[in-house]
Amino acid sequence: DAKTTQPPSMDCAEGRAANLPCNHSTISGNEYVYWYRQIHSQGPQYIIHGLKNNETNEMASLIITEDRKSSTLILPHATLRDTAVYYCIVRGGVPRAGNMLTFGGGTRLMVKP
Amino acid sequence: EAGVTQFPSHSVIEKGQTVTLRCDPISGHDNLYWYRRVMGKEIKFLLHFVKESKQDESGMPNNRFLAERTGGTYSTLKVQPAELEDSGVYFCASSLIAGGADTQYFGPGTRLTVL
């Protein structure tokens, strides 16, 4: 699976949008971009994923560039409860080939009052 | 719908003892994964079951770790004998369809401390 690069930390004001970038310049055509977060020591929580098109759900939006070499996770109105480590993971789309998730260091997002 | 559950939430054992961790996946999920995070390190994959079969166990650190999933439902991860470096948080995840388009849902983890 392609490697990802994320800033180690970011701050965001409560109520503002949090935009978390991720670079995945070696992504291949059948690889998906997944985002998870880990709050304190809880289990990783799934947020959103996408292949080519932008995606939106009740938690966040995922913007993938046209060349797919980078993406941005957007939390539209960050709250204090969104303080967590956010992981951008690229994962193969071929069943039984690299089904694991490869976690990097992620971005530690601190939402401040 | 119940999520992935893990038992126990915490376990403290002496070096050389045996510990068994249990994971109950989301009902109907054929795929079950084990991951762990040891102190100061990133979350690492251990192994992947498809029903009762081990699909990928490339992340298992050594033969002191034994994972089973009899009947294709819940899974156990046994560490025997436990060593100090096994301390960490062990996560289980499950998914419906293996591959890039499926989503793995994680349990709360079991925090293992080996003294």
Image (cartoon, grey):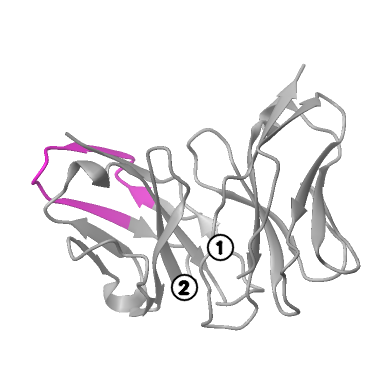
Which residue appears at 64% of the width and 74% of the height? Answer: B100
B5 left or right of A17? left
Please state which of residues A69 and B28 is positioned toward the viewer in this rendering. A69
Q: Which residue is mark 2?
A: B31
Q: What span is colored magenta in the figure? A: B6-22
Query: Residue B77: horizontal and vertical position, in percent?
Result: 26, 60
Q: Which quadrant of the rendered structure holds the N terminus of chain B?
A: bottom right
- The answer to whether mark 2 and mark 1 are in CB contact below 8 A is yes
The mark that comes first in sequence, 2 or 1, is 2
Q: Position of residue B25 (x, y in %)?
A: 43, 62
Q: Chain of mark 1?
A: B
Q: Residue at x 53, y 75 (%)?
A: A98
Residue under the image location 53 percent in, 73 percent down: A99
Residue B113 falls in image quadrant: top left
Residue at the extreme left of the image, as rendered? B16
Q: Residues within 10 Å of mark 1 (few under 14, many from 20)?
A: many
For disc 2, the chain is B
Tell me the residue that label 1 is attached to. B104
| Amino acid tagged 2 | Asn
